[in-house]
Amino acid sequence: MSVQSLVQHIDLSDLPEDWASPTMTASVQASGDAWVAESSSVILQISSASLLGEYNYLLNPAHPDAREVTFGSASLFQYEPRLLKA
C-alpha cells in the first residue's frame, strides 16, 4: 500500500472560510467529523493555521487501515527566536 493512498490533502480553497480562526468553529469541526465518518483516508494533510506553508497531519483511528500506520522518531521543532516575544 502506498503512502499516497493513505493520505488525503485538502486545498486551502476547500476549507471553510473560518478555518484559521484562533478558536474551533462549528464548520471546521463538521469538516473533520465528516472526514472521520467517511473514512476516505487514514491521514488528512491540512494546512497549518499558525505556520503558513506548513501542514498538520490528522490520523483517523477509525479507518480500517489505521493499524498499518507506523511512526518514525520525533524531532524537536525549532522556533525562530526573532518571532518570540521577549
Image (cartoon, rainbow, N blue to C red):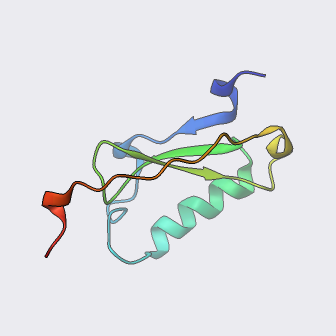
From the viewer's perspective, is 42 left or right of 26? Answer: right
Q: Quadrant of the N terminus?
A: top right
Q: Is residue 8 left or right of residue 79?
A: right
Q: Quadrant of residue 30?
A: bottom right
Residue plotted at (58% across, 37% down): 8
Q: Is residue 60 left or right of residue 77?
A: right
Q: Is residue 58 above or below residue 53?
A: below
Which residue is at 43% across, 75% downward?
25
| Left or right, residue 1 beside residue 5 | right
Report x, y in % for residue 12. Answer: 35, 45
Between 61 and 14, the one nearer to me in the picture = 61
Most foreground residue, 85 or 67? 85
Nearer-the-camera pick, 41 or 13: 41
Residue that appears at 58% across and 60% down: 32
Image quadrant where one finds the C terminus: bottom left
Percent x, y for residue 62?
81, 55
Which percent across, then down, holds residue 73? Answer: 63, 43
Q: Residue at x 47, y 65 (%)?
A: 28
In this rendering, the count of numbered labels is 0
Question: x, y (%) of residue 7?
Answer: 62, 35
Outermost residue on the top side: it is: 2
